[in-house]
Image (cartoon, grey):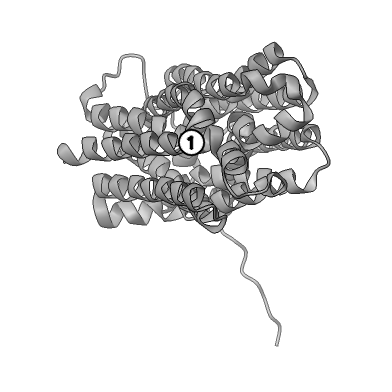
Amino acid sequence: MVLTIAPIAPDRARSLAVAVLGTVLIASTYGMARFGVGLFAPRLVAERPGLAPVVGWAAAAQFVSYAVAAAVASRTSDRSPRAGLLLAGTTASLGCVGVATTASPGWLVVLVLVGGAGAGLASPALVRVVDALVEPRRAATAQSLVNTGTAVGVVVAGVLALAVPSVAAAWWAMAAVNAAASAGLLVLVGRQDLGNRAGTGTSYDWRALGVPAVAAVVVGAGSALVWSYGPLVATRSGPVAEARVGLLWIALGIGGLVGPLTGRLVDRAGLRGAWLGSVGAVVVAHLALGAGLGLGLAWPTYVAMAAFGAGYMCLSGVLILWAREEWPDAAGRGTSLLFIALAVGQAIGAVVLDPLQASRPGAAVVVATLACLAGAALVRRRA
């Protein structure tokens, strides 16, 4: 008896390859190029003390850069997703290389501006690529999987924080992954028809995305506490040793791996119900972080990071699916709009919460929690 293995159908193989490479690109552009300053803030400050005064501004710069890049991508991603992929890999790689080599506070801010643009360019382009090249019945799951690349990137960043001898080595490694992932996607896409259906004369009902956009700004401001200052708060004011900061991000990333379930969550609860559940997980995360700080216990802090990862990956996935439902012929543009709103909120939160987290971390947790509750209430009130 001869055992034979049936070959994978070409369409299915292509769908899988696009989903995997897209996940890797999001992992690299978000995991380090966008969120890297917050992830490695304790190590950056310890190894390069001169950077300490600008860590908060650099974190805000990453969010601003992302928002600007996403705004540009909103005008081009549905027509030229290949260009978006190329620019995403290039800017993210250059930013990571720059951060790996600089000790200048001014240059750090400039370089994270460059690196942060990669994520803003990658997400809208990948929305169009996935919709065009993945089998329709698998598209929603593939979109959620690609979005979960952020969690994968955070896990990798956490492992690097524990394993590499210096911050520079981690940034060099992620620069290489950025370049490889974008190149692989460009080869895979080739000259295939990406279904660029959005034209310059197309009109959109902006009101359809108004509620999720405003809610994203408010929740984004609350989420900035963990993304920009989570490790600093946990190690400076809490019970987590600085040497174990990588475990915090591994916990966040592992929690975020539930992201591919976002499609099913939306199917069962609807967009608004899924949004409320996702933001609710972020609120629980903030409460657990506050408990860890107040009680002086490490385990609630790890629980907080895992819950935050799960909630954040799901809520960003809900935004993607919301854009696809309301603007099916311009999903990349709609995703850009909602992700810009999220990033604007994060930039505001990073600046507002900076002095508060340094002097009164408990108060910073309360403010972040209230912001997330307000973002949930905005959607529920208009359900």
Please tell me which residue lies in front, 202 or 270: 270
Instruction: Tell me which residue sits at (74%, 48%) in the image.
Output: 162
> Residue 255: x percent and y percent?
51, 54
Q: Residue 238 falls in which quadrant of the image?
A: top right
Instruction: Give the residue drawn at x 36%, y 19%.
Output: 199
Q: Is residue 115 above or below residue 31?
A: above
Does residue 206 lie above or below 230 as drawn?
above
Relative side of 99 to 222, left or right: right
Residue pushed farthest bottom?
1
Nearest the viewer among 226 and 153 is 226
Examine the rendering and report whether any part of residue 283 can be seen: yes
Q: Secondary structure at mark 1?
A: helix
Give the left or right position of residue 40, taking residue 379 as reference. right
The reply, left or right, for residue 378 in relation to residue 293 is: left
Question: Disc 1 designates what residue?
Answer: 361
x, y percent for residue 354: 51, 25
Where is residue 215 shown, x and y percent of the image? 30, 32
